[in-house]
Structure formats: C-alpha cells, structure tokens
Image (spheres, rainbow, N blue to C red):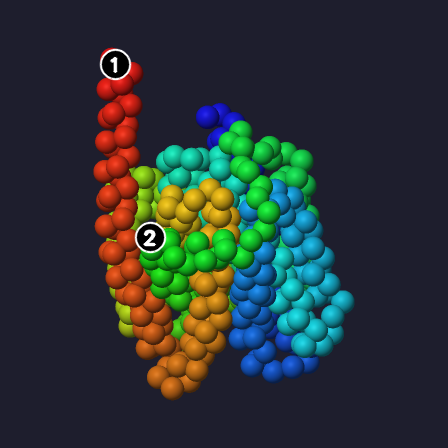
C-alpha cells in the first residue's frame, strides 16, 4: 500500500507540472496579442486551440489504442517532452497563426499526458479509487492554474518567463514519470491493436452513461476557467473598482487552483463513501446553481463575486475524477486505457464549443446572463448519472455478495 501512495504522489506531481502547459498562453494572452500585433478576437482561438489539439490527440490515441498497447509511463514522458518544446517555441514565434498552431500541437501532446496518468492511477488503485483519482485531478487543477499564479509572481517581468517556467515544469514531469515512477505490480497484458476496442467502449452502457455525465461536466468546466478572469475584470470596471492584472491572477488561482484542488480531494473522499453517481449529481447540482447565480453578482461588491466564484470553483471540479473512476470500474482491463482516452476526447471536444459560445452570448445579453448557458451541461449530466446509479448499485450488490461468499468459504 505504501508503494501505491508513493506512486500517487509522484504521478500527481508530474501531472501538476505537465498540465501547467494548458493555460500557459491564455494567462498571458494580452502580451501575446501585443507581440503578434493582432486583435482581441484571437484570444478565444488561443483558448480553444489546446482543447482542439487535445481532442485530435485523444481521438487518435483512442483509435489506435496507444495506452493499451504501449506502457503509459513512456507515453506520458515522451508527450510531456514534446509538449514542453511546442510551448517553449511560443517565445520565438511572432505571428498569431503559428502561435495558435503551436497551441494546437501542445494540446495534442497533453492527450498523451492526462489519460495515461489516469490509467496509471487505476492500475495502482484497483479499489478505493475515489480519493486517488481526486488527488490526481487536484494536481491537474492546480497545474492548470499555475500560469495565473505566474502572472502574479512575474507581474514585473517579461511574459516569456511564464512560458519558460511552464516548459521547464513539463520537462521535470517527464523526468519524474520516466525515472522515478515504477510500473504497477498488477500485470497488464499488452494486446495487439484492434479497432474493435472502440466498439467495445461504445457498446458498454454504464461506460457510455459515465461519458455523457462527463460531457455535461466538461461543457461547463473549461468555459468557466477560461472566462471567469475576464468576467471578474469586467465586473470590477462596472463597479468602478478596476483591478490590477496581478489581483485578477491571484483571484483566478485561488478559485481555480486552491478551491478546485480542495474540491477534488474532498470529492474523492466523499465518492468512496456515498458512491460516485451520488457525488457527481450533488456536485453538478450546486455547480449549475452557481453558474446561474454568478451573473447576479456582476458589478456588485467584489467579495460577493469572489465568494460565489470560490463555491463554484469547488463544486465545478469536485466530481471530475469520478467519471474516469467510473469508466475504470466498468471497462474491461483490456481496453480501459482506450475507454478513458475516448471519454476525454468526447469531453474536451465539447469544451471547444462552450468556450467559444460564451463571448457570443455575452455580446447579446451581457455578462449578467452569459454564464447561465453553462448550467445546461450539468443538468444533462445529472440525468445521465441518475441512470448510471442503477448500474453502480447493482455492481455494489454483486461485490457485497461476492465478498460475503468469500468470507464464508474462508471461515469454513
């Protein structure tokens, strides 16, 4: 058990470092736009580029069954190194088209980081995965928010420091995962690639219900992470309390990184006690409520906006790990890596639309009502997880009777 927790710690640190690549450019978007001498319209594309690349990478990986065919540690390490180089190249790029292309390629490499990390945790923790998965997603959350903290720490320095720091962290992630993390003692048979793995995923009813829940969750998550700093800035200006960029960065790190990280861990503990479906339903319900309420704080006292944002930051991510855990519970070991990657491909595909739809809605109805559209995802996700609950209950009942029978045989 000690080895399992050691592996969790190292994998989480590597995930935290590598995922700093995700928002590295978005956090310093105004500086990049000035450097490229282009318009603010590029900012939405800059934010959507990484999810688009992630979808391309995840779809390709799931189609080829890469993490079921190759060692996920090696896939993670190589992807983190390539991602670090793609991200670092932004320093020398002076045109928006090439910059966005590099962000797409960075997203492709991150599809070789996140799913393999989840697969590794599933191998190390065959049981009680809620807390383990929650800890990993907490690392992802904090890692994704690190660039916002970088804007605070490096507010007086060049934007290239943010890019350089995130690339160095990704290199360190590759070193940790390749040389320090050991393979799970559970032997996983590496089978030859077959396209039928995707068919097995798509016909597995509980796995697909977990995927639908994940899609609803993801519709809201990255759009909120992307546009909340802009919302906070606009709200402060409306209230005649303009905030410095480092203050926005600090609040964003608090909401996304700290509150989100706490939500992931607490959510993981709760999921192991009350069940994955129950935790996801509660989380999405509160999160959808915050998406509706946040607009009413627009232009009001800053502390009120921050308070709702923190609550939203906790519950918008507290259920994220449980969809992956649900898939690893119900997918056969021969295609669990493919199933996890396929799930993330679907989830991140939907983020491209939700990220880009927010500014369009905002132009029509204003920031007061723009985030209400994000509540649609959690509501749909709750319906899917209510149906998933039936399969989870039946599995718990089978596991209980199986354990009881084993104990009875041992006593005899």
Q: Residues within 10 Å of mark 1 (few under 14, many from 20)?
A: few
Q: Earlier in the sequence, mark 2 or mark 1?
A: 2
Q: Position of residue 368 (x, y in %)?
A: 33, 77
Q: Which quadrant holds residue 162?
A: bottom right
Can residue 54 be spotted in the picture? no
Position above or below: 85 against 274: below
Can residue 81 be spotted in the picture? yes
Q: Which mark is residue 206?
A: 2
**Residue lying at the far right of the rendered structure:** 92
Measure the C-alpha gap from mark 2 to mark 1.
Answer: 34 Å
Q: Nearer the viewer, residue 409 or 400?
A: 409
Q: Position of residue 178 (x, y in %)?
A: 66, 39
- Look at the numbered disc 2 and give the secondary structure of its residue: helix
Residue at (54% x, 57% y) in the render: 195
Position above or below: 82 against 346: above
Q: Nearer the viewer, residue 173 or 245?
A: 173
Side of 393 where 352 appears, left or right: right
Position above or below: 223 against 148: below
Q: Quadrant of the C terminus?
A: top left
Q: Which mark is residue 411?
A: 1
Residue at (58% x, 34% y) in the render: 183
Q: Residues within 10 Å of mark 2 (few under 14, many from 20)?
A: many
Residue at (62% x, 45% y) in the render: 70
**Residue lying at the far top of the rendered structure:** 412
- Look at the numbered disc 1 and give the secondary structure of its residue: helix
Q: Position of residue 53 (x, y in %)?
A: 59, 65
Side of 2 where 46 appears, left or right: right
């Amino acid at each position: 058990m000690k080895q399992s927790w050691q592996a969790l710690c190292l994998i989480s640190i590597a995930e935290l470092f590598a995922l700093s690549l995700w928002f590295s450019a978005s956090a310093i978007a105004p500086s990049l736009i000035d450097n490229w001498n282009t318009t603010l319209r590029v900012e939405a594309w800059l934010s959507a580029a990484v999810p688009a690349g992630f979808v391309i990478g995840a779809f390709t990986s799931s189609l080829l069954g890469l993490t079921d065919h190759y060692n996920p540690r090696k896939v993670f390490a190589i992807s983190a190194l390539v991602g670090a180089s793609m991200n670092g190249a932004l320093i020398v790029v002076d045109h928006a088209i090439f910059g966005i292309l590099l962000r797409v390629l960075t997203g492709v490499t991150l599809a070789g980081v996140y799913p393999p990390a989840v697969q590794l945790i599933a191998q190390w923790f065959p049981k009680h995965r809620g807390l383990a998965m929650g800890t990993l997603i907490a690392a992802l959350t904090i890692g994704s928010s690190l660039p916002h903290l970088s804007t605070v720490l490096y507010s007086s320095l060049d934007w290239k420091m943010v890019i350089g720091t995130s690339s160095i962290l990704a290199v360190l992630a590759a070193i940790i995962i390749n040389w320090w993390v050991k393979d799970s003692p559970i032997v996983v048979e590496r089978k030859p690639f077959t396209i039928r793995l995707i068919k097995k995923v798509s016909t597995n009813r509980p796995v697909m219900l977990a995927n639908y829940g994940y899609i609803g969750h993801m519709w809201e998550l990255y759009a909120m992470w992307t546009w909340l700093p802009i919302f906070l800035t606009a709200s402060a200006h409306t209230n005649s309390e303009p905030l410095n960029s480092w203050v926005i960065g600090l609040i964003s790190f608090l909401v996304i990184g700290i509150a989100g990280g706490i939500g992931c861990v607490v959510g993981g503990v709760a999921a192991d006690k009350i069940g994955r479906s129950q935790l996801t339903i509660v989380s999405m319900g509160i999160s959808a409520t915050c998406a509706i309420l946040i607009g009413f704080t627009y232009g009001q006292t800053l502390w009120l906006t921050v308070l709702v944002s923190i609550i939203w930051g906790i519950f918008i991510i507290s259920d994220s790990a449980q969809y992956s855990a649900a898939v690893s519970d119900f997918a056969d070991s021969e295609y669990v890596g493919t199933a996890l990657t396929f799930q993330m491909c679907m989830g991140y595909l939907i983020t491209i639309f939700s990220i880009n739809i927010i500014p369009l809605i905002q132009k029509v109805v204003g920031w007061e009502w723009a985030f209400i559209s994000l509540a649609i995802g959690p509501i749909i996700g709750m319906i899917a997880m209510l149906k998933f609950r039936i399969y989870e209950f039946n599995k718990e009942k089978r596991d209980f009777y199986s354990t009881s029978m084993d104990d009875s045989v041992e006593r005899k």
